[in-house]
Image (spheres, grey):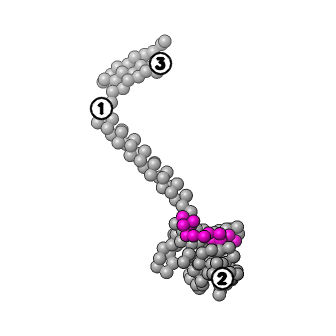
Amino acid sequence: MNYTECSSDGQNVRFGSVRSRVQVSPLRLLFMKKYLITSFLIILFFILYFFAIEKSPFIEYKLNNKTYKLLTAKNSVEWQKGLMFYKSKKELKGADGMIFIFPNKEIRSFWNENTYLDLDVYWLDDDRVVGKDYLPSILKTKEPYTINSKEEVDKVIEIIK
């Protein structure tokens, strides 16, 4: 095999071969290790932060000086289901309720069909509360009970009592 060997200032390099040896000072090695560890930790932090934000099923919403963790309903399937079929707050895995975000402002109607939790319902025009109602569970009313917003709203928040 053809190769060239060079040596200057304590460095031995063999060209044309897989093998090479470069002497590096201990201080430089320490700096390189710290740099690699710091870079790794920064990258790991950003990856974990990104996934933590993406996986949270809740949004935090401040209402009457209290911050709530809310599930989000953003489409017609989610609007229709809402908090129906939940029988305890434990099933919501830490959520205090749900926010319904609509694309336009209309008079909204909510009912308690298959709703087993008592709810405080807040009607919002943008982020301004324009009304509040109580929606008892179907277990209390025995028959479907409907509540309506008094004015057009584009958001509705249900808080579990």
Tell me: residue 152, above or below residue 26. Answer: below
Q: What's the amino acid at mark 3?
A: Gly
> Which residue is label 3 attached to?
16
Where disc 2 sits, the SS reads helix
25 drawn magenta: no
Which quadrant does the C terminus fall into?
A: bottom right
Q: What's the amino acid at mark 2?
A: Thr
69 or 25: which is nearer to us?
69
Residue at the location (66% across, 78% down)?
Answer: 138
Instruction: Work out whether residue 43 can be spotted.
Output: yes
Instruction: Work out whether residue 105 can be spotted.
Output: no
> Which residue is label 1 attached to?
25
Q: Earlier in the sequence, mark 2 or mark 1?
A: 1
Q: CA distance from mark 1 to mark 3?
A: 25 Å
Image-quadrant location for residue 154: bottom right
Mark seen at residue 63: none
Tell me: residue 74, above or below residue 24. Answer: below
Q: Nearer the viewer, mark 2 or mark 3?
A: 2
Q: Nearer the viewer, mark 2 or mark 1?
A: 2
Q: CA distance from mark 2 to mark 1?
A: 80 Å
Q: Earlier in the sequence, mark 2 or mark 3?
A: 3
The residue stretch that appears in magenta: 80-93
Image-quadrant location for residue 144: bottom right
Q: What's the amino acid at mark 1?
A: Ser
Residue at the location (66% across, 82% down)?
Answer: 141
Left or right of 63: which side holds 149? right
Q: CA distance from mark 2 to mark 3?
A: 87 Å
Q: Nearer the viewer, mark 1 or mark 3?
A: 1
> Which residue is label 2 attached to?
141
